[in-house]
Amino acid sequence: MDYAQFRYALGTQNGAKRRAVVQATGVEPSCLSVPSGVSDQPMSEEETIRGAINRAKAVLEKLPEHHIGLGLEGGLMLDQAYTQQWYLISICAAWDGNQLSIGKGLSFPIPLQAAQRIVQEGIELSTVIDEWGNTRGSNQQGGAYALLTEGRIQRADVFQQAVIAAITPFISPLYKL
Ligand SMILES: O=P(O)(O)OP(=O)(O)OP(=O)(O)OC[C@H]1O[C@@H](n2cnc3c(O)ncnc32)[C@H](O)[C@@H]1O
């Protein structure tokens, strides 16, 4: 399968997200910041997916000479069913002007202390992660995944899998049977 057959437009300038697309497709996307239309810190899976879709559609509209618009969105969700735990999620939406596809990356539990500060102080996850890791711009680098796992998992790698999941239906012949 040739993931490099398309020209991709990515709805952000974020370095970790750009690397994820390069790793997933083997080609450099055109990057343009577009509004997600959701809060800076999405607090549910539904809101995170909506932000990803908004970005994918907006960037393809702005860069119509591309085949696929990609929206990558990070967010938090509370698992009320089993663990009462907050999870970091990484979603990719892919839109070709006709068909929409969603890929979901690794869902990772975040410490209660981080979730409480985000909810109570209205701050973003990256603020807490940068504070704890004594870094700046962690969301453009390894992210919370890298801090929590001491580098075993990188934000770009998680989004890479989400991107592959989202674009494979446009590429694999098995979806056209
Ligand atoms: O530049 P854009 O594309 O907006 O990327 P972003 O990282 O700022 O924004 P997202 O919408 O993907 O994520 C929502 C918020 O969650 C934060 N966030 C998400 N995943 C993160 C991670 O792995 N590490 C640190 N912060 C993260 C992020 O910094 C935002 O404040």
Image (cartoon, rainbow, N blue to C red):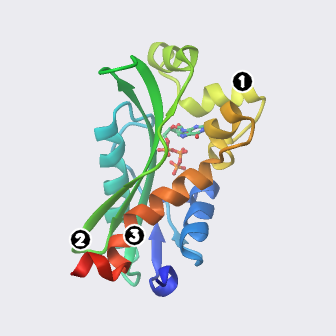
The Cα–Cα distance between marks 3 and 1, rounded to whole angstroms, is 34 Å
- Give the residue number, with chain letter if any, for mark 2: 99
Task: Judge from the rendering whether residue 169 lies leftward or rightward of residue 122; answer left or right.
Answer: left
Q: Amino acid at mark 2?
A: Gln
Q: Mark 3 or 2, which is nearer the eye?
A: 3
C-beta proximity under 8 Å, tags 1 and 2: no
- Residue 145, percent from left and from top: 62, 38
Q: Is residue 141 above or below residue 82?
A: below
Residues at circles 3 and 1 in contact by the CB criterion of under 8 Å: no
- Image point (39%, 69%), residue name: 167
Task: Identify the residue at image location x=55%, y=66%.
Answer: 21
Residue 60's spot in the image, x, y percent?
36, 71
Disc nearer the start of the sequence (1/2)? 2
Q: Compared with residue 174, is residue 13 higher up or lower down, i.e. above or below?
A: above
Q: On the image, numbered disc 1 is attached to which residue?
A: 132
Name the spot of residue 162 as percent of width and height, x first.
46, 56
Name the image quarter holding the C terminus. bottom left
Residue underneath mark 3: 167
Q: Is residue 159 above or below residue 63?
A: above
Residue type at numbered disc 1 = Trp
Taking the view exactly as shown, the residue that stands out farthest to the right is 134
Local crowd size for mark 3, using a 10 Å CA cut-off: few (<14), some (14–19), many (≥20): many
Task: Point out the tag, 3 or 2, that comes first from the N-terminus.
Answer: 2
Q: Does the residue tagged 1 have its C-beta within 8 Å of any atom of ligand 1?
A: no
Q: Residue at 42% of width from left, 65% of height from top?
A: 70
In this view, 133 is above or below 56:
above
Where residue 103 sits, quadrant-wise, is bottom left
